[in-house]
């Protein structure tokens, strides 16, 4: 028997990385999963997003624990599509208890024109802030209607606890993650009367498709060669503890705690899983 038996979780960005790790762990604890992912690239980004095959692999992991998984290809920037997927998943699985908004994108490479920077800024804010809002607005009515309370855990970043130098589009990710904190605190205040807890986790760098790609590799090579610009994200992102990148499961450990009854009195909090990054 798991501590989440009979519960249902919806996760955005579920096709790989932290999203897949969270889905598998919650399933191992007894939850059924509604898995959302765009499953296609976004032109302004300089690395590939997850694919449908990746999302299907998440489904298989969940099913390996004897739990159900419903997968939907959804762009979190499209409010109506997010609502359709959440409504369909809840109708099929019968309830909703846990919401994990964590689909995100990033781009740290320097761009030349204001038009290029503006396009990247718009997409990052649309996915990393507005996408969270869309999922919350689609999911919260189901939590309230269930009358059982619920848990929301948003994925933040150390970009909101110790910003690194940046200009242009590089600041979009930092702005977005600060925005997530504001959203979390507002929802925590508003939903406490329904016994719905809302928190955010702030990871340092995590091994995933977002960090392990050619674009990030180029920044890493520049940093290693001492040729990094002042706003090179990797050159400015050293952890205090002796680890370069955390694993998705490291973040999942914190999420699994926050969605459990062991954390039943924790709400409105920012939980750092950052290997001491924020202390530097």
Image (cartoon, rainbow, N blue to C red):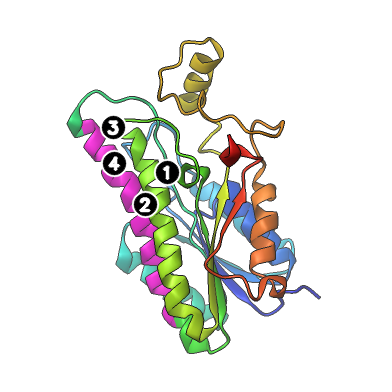
Of residue 81 and residue 207, the one placed in the foreground of this image is 207
Q: Nearer the viewer, mark 4 or mark 3?
A: 3
- Quarter residue 271 falls in: bottom right
Residue numbers of the magenta segment: 116-141
Q: Check disc 3 and report the residue beneath it.
A: 168
Residue appearing at x 31%, y 68% in the figure:
80
Left/right placement of residue 119 relative to residue 52 reads: left
Please tell me whether the stretch drawn in magenta is mainly helix, strand or loop.
Answer: helix
Spatial CA distance of label 2 from label 4 is 10 Å
The answer to whether 239 appears left or right of 174 in the picture is: right
Residue 276, position as x, y percentages in the image: 64, 40
Residue 219 against residue 128 in the figure, above or below: above
Toward the right, the furthest residue is 1
Query: How many other residues sit within 10 Å of disc 2, few (<14), some (14-19) or many (≥20)?
Result: many
Which class describes the residues within 10 Å of circle 3: few (<14), some (14-19), or many (20+)?
some
Dot placed on the residue nearer the N-terminal end, 3 or 2: 2
> Which residue does the numbered mark 4 point to in the structure image?
121
Tell me if label 1 and label 2 are in contact, CB under 8 Å. Answer: yes
């Amino acid at each position: 028997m798991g501590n989440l038996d009979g519960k249902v979780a919806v996760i955005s960005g579920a096709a790989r990385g932290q999203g897949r790790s969270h889905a598998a762990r919650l399933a191992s604890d007894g939850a059924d999963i509604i898995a959302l992912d765009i499953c296609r690239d976004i032109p302004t980004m300089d690395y590939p997003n997850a694919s449908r095959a990746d999302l299907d692999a998440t489904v298989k992991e969940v099913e390996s624990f004897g739990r159900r998984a419903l997968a939907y290809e959804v762009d979190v920037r499209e409010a109506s599509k997010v609502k359709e997927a959440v409504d369909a998943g809840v109708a099929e699985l019968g309830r909703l208890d846990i919401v994990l908004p964590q689909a995100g994108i990033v781009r740290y490479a320097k761009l030349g024109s204001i038009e290029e920077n503006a396009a990247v800024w718009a997409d990052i804010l649309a996915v990393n802030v507005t996408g969270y809002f869309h999922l919350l607005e689609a999911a919260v009515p189901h939590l309230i209607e269930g009358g059982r309370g619920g848990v929301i855990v948003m994925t933040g970043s150390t970009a909101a606890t110790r910003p690194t130098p940046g200009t242009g589009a590089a600041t979009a990710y930092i702005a977005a993650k600060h925005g997530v904190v504001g959203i979390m605190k507002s929802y925590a205040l508003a939903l406490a009367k329904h016994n719905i807890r809302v928190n955010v986790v702030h990871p340092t760098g995590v091994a995933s498709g977002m960090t392990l790609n050619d674009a990030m590799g180029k920044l890493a090579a520049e940093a290693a060669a001492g040729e990094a610009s002042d706003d090179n994200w990797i050159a400015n992102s050293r952890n205090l503890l002796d680890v370069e990148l955390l694993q998705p499961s490291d973040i999942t450990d914190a999420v699994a705690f926050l969605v459990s009854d062991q954390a039943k009195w924790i709400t409105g909090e920012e939980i750092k899983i950052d290997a001491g990054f924020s202390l530097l």
